[in-house]
Image: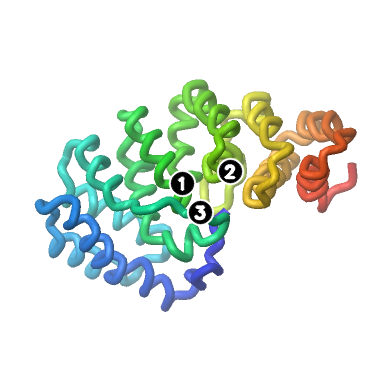
């Protein structure tokens, strides 16, 4: 879930400051170091002229659209350039929007333009989520390539990288805030529950909250099957499992 409060981005002034011309200039500077052919002036002017009446979501989309016009038309080449600017991984559970907010247009770029280049896009999402988040970018891939994508997400759930483990859960939430409903596994959530099962003993709060929120979502869209999953694991003595299940069911009686 997006923690907009990390930078108070929900108010108009912050949106203007963080996702308008200032962000265009910041990204242009970073991209120019990796790709001298980037038309910084066109990019900055596009954002300056087009973003004034837009909210956060549409501004991020505008940035992605402008990047598409100013980067090489080969998606593979464009992603190669964008991956050069991502910088060091975020070592913390927090700060993904406070310190790496500027990567939101890169994630949106992958979400909007990368569906026909599965392998390249999945690799990009892996790198993005280690700094910002890939929870939104991954969803079109789940819809178009459900078996292939969920298999990769299952491998992420066993990763040593807690950002990838968190994405394995967060990206598969059926009712992820700030995103459209993911219907793919609502009727038969077993592939998602297999992922969550791998994460039930995770020690990282960042991951545990995502798992709990995923279960809370499924309680809303397929309560009977989700209750069976929860009751199956309620006898566990693992403190992290108990924390997750308690958090997931904090608003219901089971």
Q: Report which quarter residue 50 is drawn in.
A: bottom left
Q: Which residue is mark 2?
A: 166
Q: Position of residue 103 (x, y in %)?
A: 37, 55
Q: Is residue 143 above or below residue 38?
A: above
- In this orientation, which residue lies closer to the viewer: 134 or 112? 134
Q: Mark 2 and mark 1 in contact (Cβ < 8 Å)?
A: yes
Q: Mark 3 and mark 2 in contact (Cβ < 8 Å)?
A: no
Q: Which residue is mark 1?
A: 129
For marks 1 and 3, give the CA distance: 12 Å
Kindly identify the residue that appears in the image at 21 percent across and 63 percent down: 29
Q: Which residue is mark 3?
A: 91
Which of pointers 1 and 2 lies earlier in the amino acid sequence?
1
Mark 2, other Cα within 10 Å: few <14 / some 14–19 / many ≥20: many
- In this orientation, which residue lies closer to the viewer: 103 or 46? 103
Q: Is residue 57 left or right of residue 28?
A: right
Q: Secondary structure at mark 2?
A: helix
Mark 1, other Cα within 10 Å: few <14 / some 14–19 / many ≥20: many
Which of pointers 1 and 3 lies earlier in the amino acid sequence?
3
Q: Is residue 33 left or right of residue 190?
A: left
- In this orientation, which residue lies closer to the viewer: 127 or 190? 127
Q: Report which quarter residue 56 is drawn in.
A: bottom left
Q: Is residue 154 left or right of residue 49?
A: right
Extreme top residue here?
A: 147
For marks 2 and 3, give the CA distance: 14 Å
Q: Secondary structure at mark 1?
A: helix
Extreme bottom residue here?
A: 13
Q: Secondary structure at mark 3?
A: loop
Q: Is residue 140 above or below residue 9?
A: above
Q: Is residue 41 above or below residue 229?
A: below
Q: Position of residue 53 (x, y in %)?
A: 34, 70
């Amino acid at each position: 879930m997006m923690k907009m409060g990390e930078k108070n981005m929900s108010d108009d002034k912050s949106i203007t400051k963080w996702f308008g011309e200032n962000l265009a200039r910041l990204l242009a500077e970073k991209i120019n170091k990796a790709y001298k052919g980037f038309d910084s002036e066109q990019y900055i002017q596009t954002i300056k002229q087009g973003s004034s009446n837009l909210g956060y979501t549409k501004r991020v989309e505008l940035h992605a659209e402008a990047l598409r016009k100013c980067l090489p038309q080969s998606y593979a080449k464009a992603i190669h350039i964008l991956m050069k600017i991502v910088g060091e991984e975020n070592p913390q559970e927090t700060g993904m929007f406070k310190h790496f907010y500027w990567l939101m247009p890169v994630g949106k770029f992958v979400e909007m333009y990368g569906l026909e280049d599965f392998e390249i896009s999945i690799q990009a999402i892996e790198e993005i989520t280690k700094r910002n988040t890939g929870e939104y970018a991954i969803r079109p891939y789940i819809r178009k390539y459900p078996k292939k994508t969920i298999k990769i997400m299952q491998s992420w759930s066993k990763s040593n990288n807690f950002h990838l483990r968190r994405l394995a859960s967060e990206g598969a939430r059926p009712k992820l805030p700030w995103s459209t409903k993911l219907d793919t596994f609502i009727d038969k959530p077993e592939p998602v529950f297999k992922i969550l099962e791998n994460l039930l003993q995770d020690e990282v709060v960042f991951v545990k909250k995502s798992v709990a929120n995923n279960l809370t979502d499924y309680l809303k869209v397929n309560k009977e099957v989700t209750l069976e999953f929860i009751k199956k694991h309620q006898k566990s003595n693992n403190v992290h499992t108990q924390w997750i299940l308690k958090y997931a069911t904090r608003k219901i009686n089971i």
